[in-house]
Amino acid sequence: AQSVAQPEDQVNVAEGNPLTVKCTYSVSGNPYLFWYVQYPNRGLQFLLKYITGDNLVKGSYGFEAEFNKSQTSFHLKKPSALVSDSALYFCAVREISGTYKYIFGTGTRLKVLA
Amino acid sequence: EAEVAQSPRYKITEKSQAVAFWCDPISGHATLYWYRQILGQGPELLVQFQDESVVDDSQLPKDRFSAERLKGVDSTLKIQPAELGDSAMYLCASSSTGEHNEQFFGPGTRLTVL
């Protein structure tokens, strides 16, 4: 069965510093991987996805993610954090057969300190 | 920009009462999802529709929850009777057909059961 893990409940980073939010996955076959962000009392917003091709994926708001097949990881990164990036981040994997449902991680709260 | 609409945004009810949530997906999106998100956790799929058909309701507590999408467009999720443990955010999402496609989420309905 497909699964994702986000090992950190919270990540703190100073404004202007690079940030990394970690995600590891377990799938059979090639993974479809996604990152979403959630602000308080709002729905999730799509940031980026990896389907195939280049291991470095660029997304919205300056975020990018690096797919690493040997480490089964899909870490979210940003070169320079903003206070407004503070939010809850979810990694998700999509099943590649059956109902193609999404499985979400437990989320990582990012706090960017001014 | 097209958005997923949900109503109400907030609902407070007493246990044993009936509640209903409504979702209008992005026009043309054949796939519609209902998720439950408990505070601090990732979304959990309750039901997935492809047009008007249910393709996955394995995690839907069918003794009290029901969902319909009669014309393959908007959808209603009902809980009867509500229990204290149902307090959560209920998210609706939609996507166009295609296994690579990301989901678009509505703002959610925050349910509080007293």
Image (cartoon, coloured by chain):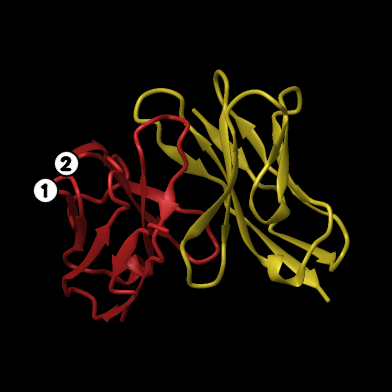
- State whether residue A114 is above or below residue A85: below
From the viewer's perspective, tell me whether residue A56 is left or right of residue A114. Answer: left
Name the image quarter holding residue A99.
top left
Horizontal and vertical percent position of residue A52 = 61, 24
Q: Which residue is mark 2?
A: B52
SS of the residue at dot 1? Answer: loop
* Residue in front for this viewpoint, A45 or B39: A45
Q: Colour of chain A?
A: yellow
Would residue A66 be found to the left or right of residue A60 on screen?
A: right
- The answer to whether mark 2 and mark 1 are in CB contact below 8 A is yes
The residue that label 1 is drawn on is: B70
Question: Looking at the figure, which quarter contains the C terminus of chain A?
Answer: bottom right
Residue B98 percent across, percent down from the top left: 39, 30
Q: Give percent across and percent down for residue A76.
A: 72, 46
Q: Amino acid at mark 1?
A: Leu
Q: Position of residue A15 (x, y in %)?
A: 84, 68
- What is the crowding at mark 1: few (fewer than 14 residues within 10 Å), some, or many (at least 20)? few
The amino acid on which the numbered mark 2 sits, given as a three-letter code, is Glu
Q: Colour of chain B?
A: red
